Image (cartoon, rainbow, N blue to C red):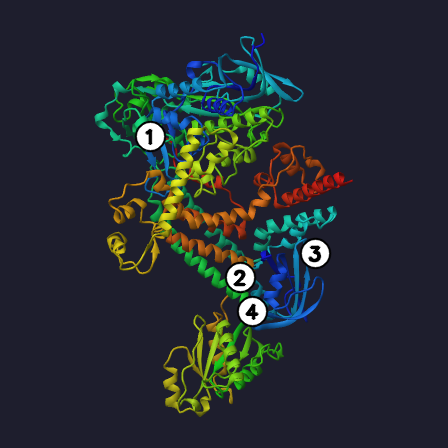
Amino acid sequence: MLYPESYDVVVIGGGHAGTEAALASARMGVRTLLVTQNLEALGQMSCNPSIGGIGKGHLVKEVDALGGAMALAADQAGIQFRTLNSRKGAAVRATRAQADRVRYRTAIRLRLEAQENLALLQDSVDDLIVQAGGVSGVRTQQGLEVNARCVVLTSGTFLGGVIHVGLQQSQGGRVGDAPSNALAKRLRALGLPVGRLKTGTPPRLDGRSIDYSRLQAQPGDMPVPVFSFLGNAGMHPRQVPCWITHTTLQTHEIIRGGLDRSPMYTGVIEGVGPRYCPSIEDKIHRFADRDSHQIFLEPEGLDTHEVYPNGISTSLPLDVQWALVRSIPGLEKARILRPGYAIEYDYFDPRALHPWLETQSLQNLFFAGQINGTTGYEEAAAQGLLAGANAALRARGDAPWWPRRDEAYLGVLVDDLTSRGVTEPYRMFTSRAEFRLQLREDNADARLTPIGRQLGLVDDLRWARFEAKQVAVADERARLSAWMLRPGSAAALTLEPLLGKALERDVSVLDLLRRPELSHAAVLSCLQPEAPSLPQDVAEQVEVEVKYAGYIARQSEELERDRRFEDALIPADFDYTQVSGLSREVESKLQKIRPATLGQASRISGITPAAVALLIVHLRRRHSSKAGACAA
Amino acid sequence: MAPANVIVALATAPGRAGVAVLRLSGQGLAQFARQLTGITPEPRHAHLVGFRDLMGAVLDRGLLLWFPAPASYTGEDVLELHTHGGDVLPRRVMQACLALGARPAQPGEFTRRAFEHGKLDLAQAEAVADLIDATSEAAARGALRSLSGDFSKQINGLQETLITVRVQLEGAIDFPEEELPVAALARAQAWLTPVLGTLQRLLAEGLRGQALRMGRQVVLFGAPNVGKSSLLNRLAGEALAIVSDEAGTTRDAIRSHLELAGLRVELVDTAGVREGAQAVEKLGIARAHEAASQADLVLWLQAFDQVDGLAIPVLPVGVPVLEVWNKGDLATPTQSAQVLKRANTCVVSAQTGAGIADLEQRILAALGWSAGVEPGFLARTRHLDALRLTLRHVEQALQAPAEELVAEELRLAQRALDLVLGDFVADDLLGEIFSRFCIGK
């Protein structure tokens, strides 16, 4: 039957990409439908129970700055919070929360149900309705047809998913859930470039069978970090620690003994796994000289005893899993609740996407999340938000939007994906971002909330808070910059113990904060012990900006040099075969990837400066001949 | 319009020739020309001008042509400066341009700009594309091949060390919870100190190589009547080849070119420096000071018959000084011995030629040049610029207070070194991290 209502945007999938996509699209005021196989699994964390981390926490804050759900849900579900790299500089500090799975799902579900313009439907999408080179709706397993202006596909590992435990295989999108094979087949038939990737999870343990007395506790940080720019520690549930243990030589023996029944080492798995998240059998094989590997025991929630042993992802047979778990200190009597497994799934070469995540071959079809070859909730959520926002922009008839590499990790993410493609599941790292010093968690709001507001992603409450913070930051900066300290003055003398020596010349308090060892809090509590302290985010913002100012000014120069070139758009219908002088290889690469800008073109592997120069000439000619035609 | 993004290069082949042409391209070059020559050029007119340094001293006289944008080769403002030929004068004028904010052009950069501004037709564009292809890859490989294999080996070694340090740092930043082997910051500093040493040595070698091609400037400086002119004539006369002997561009300085053990040396005679001089003489003395401050080496000439009542002149800071005592034939053995006790001192007689051979060796040594030592590599200015930039970032990395700042300096250091070698992207670094460390919970 035809679904009684038609939609501007239909989102397929209810994971982290799908929920952010649906929320973003609905926030922008277009009618949105989210279709998922299982409404109970909305916002499900299928792998480890944690949100954030280095590079990933940055993405979460960016999603938050654009009005997304992930950070607030983490604040409502987080049961252990840490700031990683807290001893390093602000640019590489990152928030991470262990999240209670049930509370996280609940937070996301409530948010979805409270969102205006958003409808939910439990069904499985089997087919896309395609008309005149573009997608115009979906067909479901139950025989519904839904018409839509745009479709966002976020099917995660469900496309052609195959689960491996030892040499046994079964089909599934996640243990216990059916794969989306009809859709996978349909997409393959549409000629989209497809590949196979692999990822895995560890066995889950019964916490009541763990001997915690033998383990080292790892409590969260105090004061407890907060994820969302709108969040506060009062939102957090009760906090609990994680625990640390190690594999032993005996563990490694057991694993080696089981390799002949490993799907990885017997060649059954063809998909490529991530190098930074190897299975325990991989670690032992590749780093044979290490006699121990660290394992973090992460609680899955406050209302369950289930524990996630982070560090022993494996697809070894069940008997080997039991033996290896029980060779680990503290886990001698541990019971496995669910076995670990590896999953292989289809992904689509993201170089076939525009940087706004629309497929180049099928108009109005957007891809986000693991389907694009990424891994991680945060990478998925960020793409989901971008794809949802662009689907809404398309439905409204507006031009697409995507951030540049110097504006957001989200910009780095889509540029890497669409220019370079992936050879393994793609995860964010700060070392991927050449403008790392300016892409910080603390300024994600300053970088993205204004554009988010403009696009319609940011509501009044967030906007008001943002503006208030920016005003407070500017006021404080102005106050400290005008506040001069003179050598020998009373203020200078109070500061002397902090400075280690007497002040030698006039200096503003702001300039004083440039010194790496001086914090805003330390200086101000010294100078004005009585004054009420500023909100921490404001003080932090002022201090961090001053400390990085010189470096960021230098990066801006670097940026300015490349800007003209970077932003030059290549028309979507540009015919690379008309550019004589390009080598066959370069031409076919460009024809396939269809970069949106010259900057993107220049980052494609194998694209020479000469090829870029030729493109410049041709773009210019095209431009001037068009202008000429108009004049005539 | 303020000058912006100005590039400069020698458009004619380097070496001995009657005329050399320097070409500049960029924005706001009319003002640039005014700063360089003091005149406001007319478009496409040949002006006879003096090219001046920042102090206003005239370096050379020649022709200036201004081609305002867009009617120029590159489509931007273009200046052509026709100077006298040879190595020294064009180099000086080039330096004056650099001092005014221009930077040396990359290979093919003029053509590329022409290209970008649509000044070439398609056939030309394609030919140029090949050229740029050749140069950008060659900028690295081809150019390196023309240098000694030893040099590229050393650069590769540096690159490897930088990568190793970056891998440690980035590993520590992106994977703080992994049990990585070391305290990255301390380790980085330990690795970087020798890198600094190697860079300094390579730079010195490069400069020495450049000296071989470009020559070095030695200024004779001292009180009147100590025998500067006779020493100049003696040195010039003893030289293997006198390249030229021209009237100075300043009223009181005489320049001679000679070759010492294969090194080209420009010898500059200056006005005698003394107190209580009259106006015109004062001008000459001011120029002597200026010449001395710009020299690669200053010979501070004194004479045994002038020892009484002379104040020690103000010597330039930062320029090596060799103290030369002339008229050694008039000195008693005690006097000579006393003088020679001091460091950087030698005794000569311009009259008899005694001590001149020794002086030549001392000059060469002071210029970092000694026979029998390998001339280093024939670095291009671009290579030296890249090495200097790398050095600066490594120095700053050693002082940076936090991991991510050290990492930022090293990213830039490596980019600078990439100008010599080739390309390296962030993902390679991750690959290195993954292959060296067991990463992943």
Q: Which residue is mark 1?
A: A232
Mark with earlier residue (3, 2):
3
Could you tell me which secondary element the residue under label 1 belongs to? loop
Residue that badge 2 annotates: B377
Q: According to the image, label 4 marks what residue?
A: B53
Circle nearer the viewer, 3 or 2: 3
Q: Position of residue A52 (x, y in %)?
A: 39, 31
**Quadrant of the snapshot with the N terminus of chain A:** top right
Specify whether disc 2 shares its chain with disc 4: yes
Neighbor class of circle 3 (other Cα within 10 Å; few <14, some 14-19, many 20+) is some
Q: In the shown orientation, is residue A529 left or right of residue B339?
A: left
**Residue type beneath disc 1:** Asn
Q: Secondary structure at mark 4?
A: loop
In the picture, measured across the screen, residue A135 lies left or right of residue B205, that is right
Labels 1, 2: one chain: no
Q: CA distance from mark 2 to mark 4?
A: 29 Å
Kind of residue sitting beneath label 4: Asp
Q: Nearer the viewer, residue B110 or B78?
A: B78
